[in-house]
Amino acid sequence: MRAVVIDSERHVRVETLPDPELPGADGAIVEVTATAICGSDLHFLEGHYPIDQPVPIGHEAVGVVVETGSEITDFRVGDRVLVSSVSGCGRCAGCHTQDPVKCVRGPQIFGSGLLGGAQADLLAVPAANFQLLAVPDGIDTEQALLLTDNLATGWAAAKRADIPIGGTVAVIGAGAVGQCAIRSAFLLGAATIFAVDPVEARRVRATAVGAHAVPAPGAQTILDATDGLGADCVIDAVGTDASLDDALASIRTGGTLSVVGVHDLQPYPLPALVCLLRSLTIRMTTAPVQQTWPELIPLLQAGRLSVEGIFTGTLPLADAPRAYDAAISRSAEHLKVQLIP
């Protein structure tokens, strides 16, 4: 099969790898029909995480089941499915909450070195009854791909931000996750949202759904707009020292910071005493993907939540190096790129 890999020299290439084997009796093999590049994939390319051998990359996949283990009861060969980007064992008390992040055996993420990458022709899925979801009626491919990670992450970020009805929210980072968080925050009752990003085109895209554009760093602008108080809550969809600093400077006393941006391996110097004295609530998570599906899918089907405009391009899998060049440029035209095997 073909798979996109990032090597130790930080080069993206499409390689021919052996077809994956069924990962046990509770597993399945999915033929990938659509996948996408996530901002967190770029950490490998930009040197934030060490690589000592080529890593098959990607954790967002929609496809068709082509093989199942003997314990699979919920899916059959030929079913069209989407795959949770975060994998759990599906059997423990944590997974029974439908949050793979709480898996007591430790959650794993596709395309991070332990599990196969989703930017490939085939993907081996362990605990498939838990990881897979049949693509629901009325859900198109772009929506399904976003349900595997970015929309689930943005929704979780907004829910965990304690948004008061009619409140003010700052979203740091207006990439795909940030755009999903903005739309989610409006749906959850925010009246005013500041979209903070250094790229003007991304800020403009956020204004199209009602946000106020703020160049990064945004703290002073947000303080000026809120009579010096700051936002009721802040969502950090970037996860760098600079974005965390900006988030903490933008939030009012007693507010909530919800972090879903993926940080590098270096410790962040959290000003713990200041956070304590300001009575801040800080929450961090990757997406509890499966837990979000019962909420998000009806909203998408009913047209109450739109993800139109999140994807800005589609390329064949063979053009993955060009797609990564577009993604890493963070240019006006390229917010999120879909790859078709």
Image (tube, rainbow, N blue to C red):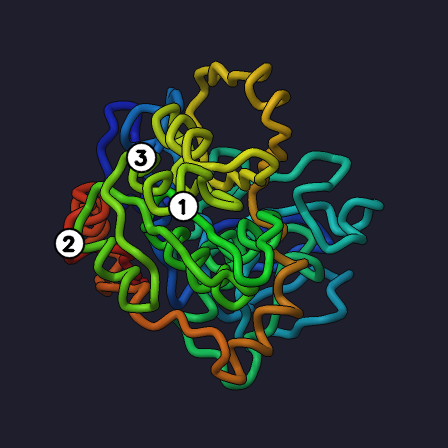
Residue 220: image location, x then y, percent: 31, 34
Residue 10, placed above or below residue 297: above
Instruction: Say whether disc 2 or disc 3 marks the residue closer to the N-terminus.
Output: 3
Residue type, numbered disc 3: Gln
Q: Residue at x 31, y 24 (%)?
A: 47
14 sits to left or right of 123: left
Q: Is residue 326 left or right of residue 271?
A: left
Give the labeled residue for mark 2.
332
| Quadrant that contains the C terminus | bottom left
Residue at mark 1: 226
Q: Is residue 226 above or below residue 273?
A: below
Front residue (pair 220, 318): 220
Q: Nearer the viewer, residue 101 or 207?
A: 207
* N-term-proximal mark, 3 vs 1: 3
Any part of residue 174 in sight: yes
Element at badge 2?
A: loop
* Quarter residue 60 falls in: bottom left
Q: Nearer the viewer, mark 3 or mark 1?
A: 1
Kindly report the distance in space between the C-alpha atoms of the residues bearing marks 3 and 1: 10 Å
Inspect the image, locate mark 1, and give the three-letter code of the amino acid beneath it: Thr
Which mark lies nearer to you, 2 or 3?
3
- Residue drawn at x 54%, y 53% is 158
Badge 2 local density, few (<14 within 10 Å), some, or many (20+)?
some
**Quarter of the rendering containing residue 75:** bottom right
Query: Badge 3 local density, few (<14 within 10 Å), some, or many (20+)?
Result: some
Kindly identify which residue carries mark 3.
220
- For label 1, the crowd category at 10 Å Cα-Cα, with few meaning under 14, some 14 to 19 and many 20 or more, is some
Q: Is residue 111 above or below residue 143?
A: above
x, y (%) of residue 113?
A: 48, 33
Q: Of the residues under marks 2 and 1, which one precedes in the sequence?
A: 1
